[in-house]
Amino acid sequence: MTPLMQIPYEQLDNAYRLAPEIVLCASGILIMLIDPFTSAPRKRLMGWLGFVGMLGALAALGVSSRHAGAAYSGLVMVDGFSLFMHAIVIVVGALVMLGSFHYLDEERVQRGEYYALILFAVTGMCILSGANELVTAFLGLEMSSIATYILAGFRRTALKSNEASLKYFLLGSFATAFFLYGIAMVYGATGQTGIPAIAGVLASASPSPLLVLGVGMIFVGLGFKVVIAPFQIYAPDVYEGAPTPVAGLLASAPKAATFALLLRVFYTSFSTVGPLWFWAVWIAAVLSMVVGNFAALTQTNVKRMLAYSSIAHAGYIMVAFAALTAVGMAAALFYLAAYALMKLGAFLVVTELGGTGEKRLEIKDYAGLGTQQPVLAACFALFLLSLLGLPLTGGFVGKFYAFQAGLDSRLVWLVVIAALNTIVGAYYYLQVIVVMYFREPQTEFPAQRTGGPLRVALMACAIGVIYLGVFPSRVMHYAYASAQALLSR
Amino acid sequence: MPPHGHLLSVITFLPLLGVVALLCLRAEDRTWMRRIALATALADLVISLLLLPGFHMADSGYQFRETFSWITAPPIFYNIGVDGISLFLILLTTFLTPLAILCSWVSITERVREFFIMMLVLEVGLIGVFASLDLFLFFFFWEVMLIPMYFLIGIWGHGRKIYAAVKFILYTMLGSILMLVAIIWLYNVTHSFELPDILAALQSGTVQVPMKTEMLMFGAFFLAFAIKVPLFPLHTWLPDAHTEAPTAGSVILAGVMLKLGTYGMLRFCLPLFPEASHRLAPLIATLAIIGIVYGALVAMVQTNMKRLIAYTSVSHLGFVVLGIFAFSSISIQGAIFQMLSHGVSTGGLFLAAGMLYDRRHTYEIKEYGGLATPLPNLMSFFLFICLSSLALPMLNGFVGEFLILVGVFEQHVAWAAWATSGAVLSATYLLWMYQRVALGEVTVERNNELADATPREKTILVVVSVAILFMGVASPLFTRRMQPATENLLHQMDRPHSSGPVLAARPAAARSGDRAVLANVPAAALERAPIVPR
């Protein structure tokens, strides 16, 4: 005789596996509900609520890691790989919140929905990094994209912010359309949308023209989102116009989450048709590095410079991607972790220095920062040196692993091109340091305007960058183990 | 725990203690900052001298070894040790750093704390490079050291300092990033970053590197080192960096940093890639000889004292490279000795020039003239250092140059003949500079009022002069310790197992020729120069 009511263990397991997403989404909805009832001076509370939501999601990550496996009939996968990416995007989201409190006050746009949108965007990215099925991935992509379109335009009165939002929306919609078409064509060619299922079909079938087209469109669609050349056109304008903390979010978290999907799809589903797309990756890597670095050389605006540098960094990650081995995947994961921290850190410094209305964004405005604000300048120098790839920083170890993965797969020329590109990069990163330390101040910097949260976020980024640079072993072991687990399935 | 404790680690990282102490001081305690920096550097010097009694002279391998696991993916070790080659270079670093700090005593008035922090961090990086036996660790220190030097030039330099600083760092990075690629490549071939393990694997033949790969890797390593040396035609960053750097920066740059290049060639290029070294030796020697002559000729026509001294480095380091790529034990010992003596002499020249700059704030030679009258003490020391730099017998410069020329002569008479011309030219440009600066009537009126050397400056100059004389007369104390390491190095270049079609007959023959010559050299050298050790 069966008991009257069965505890739905399977459903419970599914819920555990999606725990971080559930916590994030619930906090977002909670903020939306409470927001109308809070008075204007207390809006900051919403931010703290969101931050607590992020911490809750990190804790929920612990829960889901104990219930690893496929959820909802294989739509979502909880494995080492997805947990790694979850951790990156949630940490980035939490730090962006801390960095935004004061900024929103200054810009007079302190509103609850800002934090709710960040939570929703992060939820989308979490789904993206755990998706094991293409339509689910599309949902995640849309969820994160739509939230970030609004965030990019959050400084409603600023023309540039509006421009950023519209541009991001129009081009982003194109990209998601490409992605969706790609999914449809791959479905047409294989009859499957599950990522492992596609791999199963392709293992025995020869690639049809429809499949080639589908793979190409998926690559283009995701290439837009990770900002690799030649799909990079929008990035500098969007990052420049978006509120600076949002730019920090855009440059790090969606890139990490979309790279996760890119790696998962191309390393598993399309691994058997590697020759079809290997050269596309190779060329995109070279183009991104060259275009990003050389365009960054001539920038005078810090945000634009950082935007171009993020294109170049996508290129370095593509070098690891092109290795097509577990080592390459692990290197890409590690690089993404280090990159997210240093890029976000750099944008947080820019947030702090920009001042009300984002007035100080030219590199020359930073003259004399080294003597006037030594701590901030030192943090910025650290992030720039990490982006440059100097030892002691996570950026260096990331490049080291990427180069190693490339050389391991005998991509000597690609690695040499990447190496030479870092020298080009060195020039413009050092240029900022030159201005901060070697030039006399032109404008007086106000004494420390902000305290608490932003500084905590900055310190967290700085400590993370140094930790990854000095003791990378643990993170790398984890990345490698999860890459191997994913590829051996 | 090794019997010597962690002596080498202590020497490497002691300056960081000074950095911490400097950070604790209040901004107005400038005198204390200077004292603490000097005390730290002196303490490091004293502790580094403890290496000498503990160093086993007959042992050709690495001593004072310390090995800890640092990164486990891929396996990277904190693996340090010294042999007869790096021992003295570490001592040179700890010797020159206190002098460089002392010479900045009054000339650095802005951002004093940061200046001394940079100097001490630089010392850590330099000692770390010489002590590293793990390729990753080596690269780590190699890059870390760039940053303090970049700031030293960029913040406390003069004239076109930013241009010079950026040029310096970009040039160096261009070389080193390709070296990183080669290091990783080597790891993928040998599965190790430990120099001793890699050498053992290559020597025993368990790992074979195709000739083309070896040439490429050699090229990547060599480019990094050649830029650092700097070897003609990669030297163009050097005059700018030297001219615009503050005195202390120039002293460390010329005294120690340039040696990183030649040290790297000895430590990595030769033993790791012997075939490529042999094949490219004629080309490299030609460049070295061009550097010797060209550096000397360009030095002769300089009107700026510091630029002149900078070009003498191009010329003198050319000798070192030539000595290394003659592959004889004598010439390599000479090269190491020349590295040390160039460090002391050129460091001394920059210190003396810096003292003149402190008085007149110019390096233009035409602004001086007849200084021997108002500045008798300073100018006598200056002359002494010039003489050492132009290799007067009894002084340190002579020993190195002589050993190099002897060693090179045994192998290639023509190389030696060309190189000798550089020795002659060096007398010309240095003595001519001295004549224009010190001798004759005082040409610029206000130079009459200049004050002679202060006790602080005399201390610096006496220490340098004593070192010059000591190295000149007691060179066997040095070479005796270098000899086992150099012979071990030549032995490491043998690849008994790698015979195959790629091995041309010539290098093999040349190497057996080396052995034959080596057997003869001691006696011959002993006859000609009693000061040569044996």
Image (spheres, grey):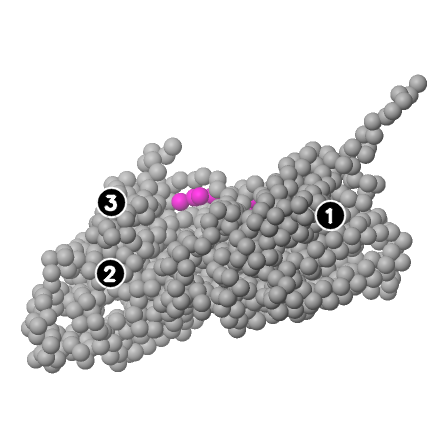
Mark 3: few/some/many CA within 10 Å (<14, 14-19, 20+): some
Kindly identify which residue carries mark 2. B109
Q: Distance between the residues labelled 3 and 2?
A: 24 Å
On screen, residue B244 versus residue B206, left or right, reads: left
Mark 2: few/some/many CA within 10 Å (<14, 14-19, 20+): few
The residue stretch that appears in magenta: B73-80
Kindly identify which residue carries mark 3. B43
Indicate the chain on which mark 1 is placed.
A
Amino acid type, mark 1: Ile
A406 in relation to B420, above or below: above
**In what element is the residue under mark 3?**
helix
In terms of image quadrants, where is residue B437? bottom left
* First in residue order: circle 3 vs circle 2: 3
* Co-location on one chain, circles 1 and 2: no
On screen, residue B267 versus residue A413, left or right, reads: left
Kindly identify which residue carries mark 1. A127
